[in-house]
Image (tube, rainbow, N blue to C red):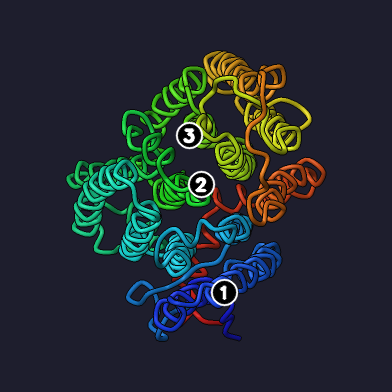
Amino acid sequence: MITHEIVLPIVLPAVIAAVIALTMRRDIALARTASLASAVALLLLGIALVSLASDGSVRTYALGGWPAPFGIVLVLDRLSALMLLLTAVLAVAVLLYAVNGWDTRGRHFHALLQFQLMGLNGAFLTGDFFNLFVFFEVLLIASYGLMAHGGGARRVAAGVRYVVVNLAASALFLFAVGLLYAVTGTLNMADLAVKVPEVAAADQALLRSGALLLLLVFAVKGALVPLHFWLPDAYVNAPAPVAALFAVLTKVGAYAIIRLFTLAFGEGAGDAAWLAAPWLMPAAMLTLLLGMFGVLAARRLAAMVSFAVLGSMGTLLIAVALFTPPALSAGLYYLLHSTLAAGALFLVADLVAERRAGHGDALVAAPVFAQSGLLGALFVLGAIAMAGLPPMSGFIGKLLILDAARDAFNRNWIWSLMLSTSLLAIIGFARGGSSLFWKSASFPGRLDARQPMRAALTITAAALLLAANAALVVFAGPVTRYLDATAAQLFAPSDYIDAVLGAEGGNE
């Protein structure tokens, strides 16, 4: 039986984007309706695909009926289904926020956002590295258009820097896959996992060079130190709903690292097994440290959240770099938590900025503004989650990672770093919240209390992401069981390889 549901997360936003661009570009109401309907459909589809993948089977979809490794194959397993669902949740919240008026500040917002969703979903589903490169380019083009949405010299300049860095990474990507293809004769991920252990000793240097170059490319996407420099500037200058959606963009880099280095360069890779570990761990630790110092030093709320995203990537990749099933399961829990928390905080930062005329989201005391109590409550919940304090999901995520690292040889370094940087985050967010809400309560005067249009909708969007974050706590048992099974599936790649290479035509 052909499971066409697998291809729908790519086809649906691609079709809707084209329809919006060609027939609805002058009718914002129709564009909003089509875009929201697509996002909700992707959310329902994401739930269905997670349910489908939860039986542990790996399903494939061969485009055009060409079998792997020669044709284009999409692969649905527990990890890809989970990432599709996370992206859809974020997209629904972002669109609810954007229809407040952000989508009218420039042209083609909804078409670009749908192309962005197509690129994200394609990157999570593709089963070969050439098409991963293609979907990365779709991501890059759409994200640049979204970054520049609404114009402004600083936004365009930040967008240009973002594009230049990512184009350089794309060039390296092509070079890296060229090396891997020269050595193994394939770019299919499952086929690569079969061919890597068979590579002759004389070609090991080329194989390792190609794999490490890919690690470098994915590190750029994931903003890993020392390739992180583009992230704070790009996220701070992006429109708020775009920055919230970008919270999952860095996770594409982490996803690609997990996929490549558990499938093709995992336990069965012979001399190249766990090739990334010695490079990934120190870079992840430095990323965490730099990100949390950035939180402490930030002068704007959006900048603080951007550096928190950087720090969260460090925490996530520390778990990945341990390359054990429990650590990867903990890292995936932290990935879900940090994406939702960062998305919510970007929206809260914009809600605060638009109500503080003349002060924006600068971390200075100013007269009280409209709905400061409600926004203060949302900020506190988001800050608690991002800093890793109970009862929000960040606490559980960090606790799981600390527990998973107890048998690691560098356990003391990991524990010390994660606990000390959590303290930095707490101090940074407490300072920011104190300036924005506590000190402002005693500041003389009051800022314009006019209610922005559809204020309830924008606050609902931020609250939705925080509610999803809280759901990770309430349903921590079922979620961690799913993630444990996901990590076990990633560390036993034979099912993935059999599903891709063993099924004639790839469709069953």
- Above or below, 291 against 491 in this view is above
Compared with 255, 91 (above or below) is below
Q: Secondary structure at mark 1?
A: helix
Q: Residue at x 57, y 84 (%)?
A: 2
Quadrant of residue 404 within the rendered picture = top right
In this rendering, the label closer to the viewer, 1 or 2: 1
Q: Secondary structure at mark 3?
A: helix
Question: Foreground mark, 2 or 3?
Answer: 2
Task: For label 2, count other residues whose C-alpha is less than 10 Å away and answer few (under 14), some (14-19) or many (20+).
Answer: many
Looking at marks 2 and 3 on the same chain, the residue that comes earlier in the sequence is marked by 2
Q: Quick one: quadrant of the N terminus?
A: bottom right
Instruction: Residue type at mark 1: give it.
Output: Ala
Give the Cα separation between the discs numbered 1 and 2.
21 Å
Q: Looking at the picture, which amino acid does disc 2 mark?
A: Ala
Q: Is residue 304 above or below residue 176?
A: above
Q: Tell me residue 500's x, y (percent).
A: 47, 70
Amino acid at pointer 3: Ser
Q: Which comes sooner in the sequence, label 1 or label 3?
A: 1
**Mark 1, residues whose alpha carbon is within 10 Å: few (<14), some, or many (≥20)?**
few
Does residue 322 appear anywhere in the picture? no
- The residue that disc 3 covers is 306
The residue beneath circle 2 is 240
Q: Secondary structure at mark 2?
A: helix
* Place of residue 442 in the rendered image (x, y in percent of width and height, measured from the top left): 71, 17
Q: Nearer the viewer, residue 26 or 18?
A: 26
Distance between the Cα atoms at labels 2 and 3? 11 Å
Q: Nearer the viewer, residue 185 or 105?
A: 105
The mark found on residue 468 in the picture is none
Residues packed near mark 3 inside 10 Å, few (<14), some (14 to 19) or many (20 plus): many
Picture disc at residue 29: 1
